[in-house]
Amino acid sequence: MTVQFIEVYSDIGAGKHGTTHGVAMLSEYCEKIRPDSKVHKIQAQYQPITPQHPSAKYLEYLVPFFQNNLLPNVTTALDDCQQQGDFPIIISGDHSNAMGNLAAFRNHHQDAKVGVVWIDAHADLHSIFTTPSGNMHGMPLAASLGLDNLDCQVATPNDEAVAGWNSLKQLAKTDNFTTQNLYFLGLRSHEPPEEHLLHTHDIFAYNAKGEKFQDAHEKLSLTQILENLTKELACLDAVYVSFDVDSLDSSLIPATGTPEPNGYSADEMQQIFGALLSLPNVKLFEITEFNPTLDDDTDKHQTIFALLGEAVKLIEQR
């Protein structure tokens, strides 16, 4: 199987800008290893001035970008991949872009039962009503699942912000993704409102030490977790795998906006890729949040390049 690359040059939703440089570096790497692969480039345009909405920073730019640029262009790319028999790999700036990327994926597989594997240190389950920072890259899953989480409300956004947030929740025109089919790997940083959702919906979630979120006493090896996960995924038609580089241990990847200790090693991430990317119902792979402007250690950058290269090889072997 051959791959196509979808490059999303947007860091609008990040707390620290610079992930577009990460997209460019990963793009250069992919051009070297797969010079014949088709590439779709999607570029955001905005002025990073003072955001209008403290609990939804740069929402005024994100909504039109997602509606008028990201969503239609990712949809076109996915259609092209289907026609050509290729596999789509998204190289994205910050994780807020997954609101549009996942919506396009869900719309493309509108009659399918969709699942999402979220390989990330963070839960990304905040809404504009619960966020402590206002950074939209902490909200893609809440938006995708339509979760306001008003039980844990701490912010009171104005009507304009609420309207924009509702627009983001409605990017997907289908209800084919629910919390029952959301799976976290490497999760270890979360706030009480997100914990409320994880508990309430009994979401599949393990940290990099193998501890289950709902019960830290239940500790499994990575092999056992992946075996359980693949059994869960078997009942799904189309699976979206999103790899945030901060799922790696912070000693390996300081070049990201919110690095966290106690993450995965590179070998463990290769094991995860090996278990997931060979599954026939995995239909898209996304890599996101690589920000080389925050650390210029090129040796550590090579870890990200090597992991992306490994993902490409595994996909092509399908």
Image (cartoon, rainbow, N blue to C red):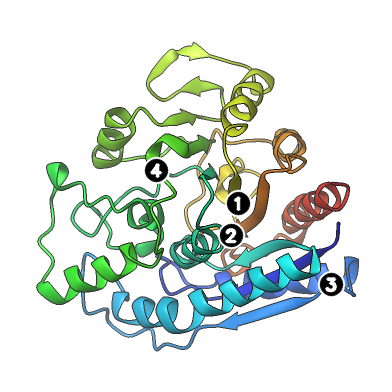
Give the spatial CA distance, label 4 vs label 2. Answer: 22 Å
- Circle 3 — which element? loop
Tell which of 315 and 123 is nearer to you. Answer: 315
Q: Is residue 89 above or below residue 272?
A: below
Of callouts 4 and 3, the N-terminal one: 3
Q: Is residue 274 above or below residue 315?
A: above
Quarter of the image where one finds residue 131: bottom left
Amino acid under disc 2 = Thr
Q: Few, some or many C-alpha atoms within 10 Å of disc 1 (few <14, some 14-19, many ≥20)?
A: many
Give the spatial CA distance, label 4 vs label 1. Answer: 24 Å
Amino acid under disc 1 = Val
Give the spatial CA distance, label 2 vs label 1. Answer: 6 Å
Of callouts 2 and 1, the N-terminal one: 1
User: Circle 4 sits on which residue?
Assistant: 178
Give the spatial CA distance, label 4 vs label 3. Answer: 33 Å
- Is any atom of residue 119 visible in this view? no
- Circle 2 — which element? strand
Tell which of 127 and 253 is nearer to you. Answer: 127
Q: Few, some or many C-alpha atoms within 10 Å of disc 4 (few <14, some 14-19, many ≥20)?
A: some
Q: Which mark is residue 245?
A: 1
Q: Closer to the observer: label 4 or label 3?
A: 4
Across and down, in percent, residue 80 comes to 71, 73
User: Circle 2 sits on which residue?
Assistant: 288
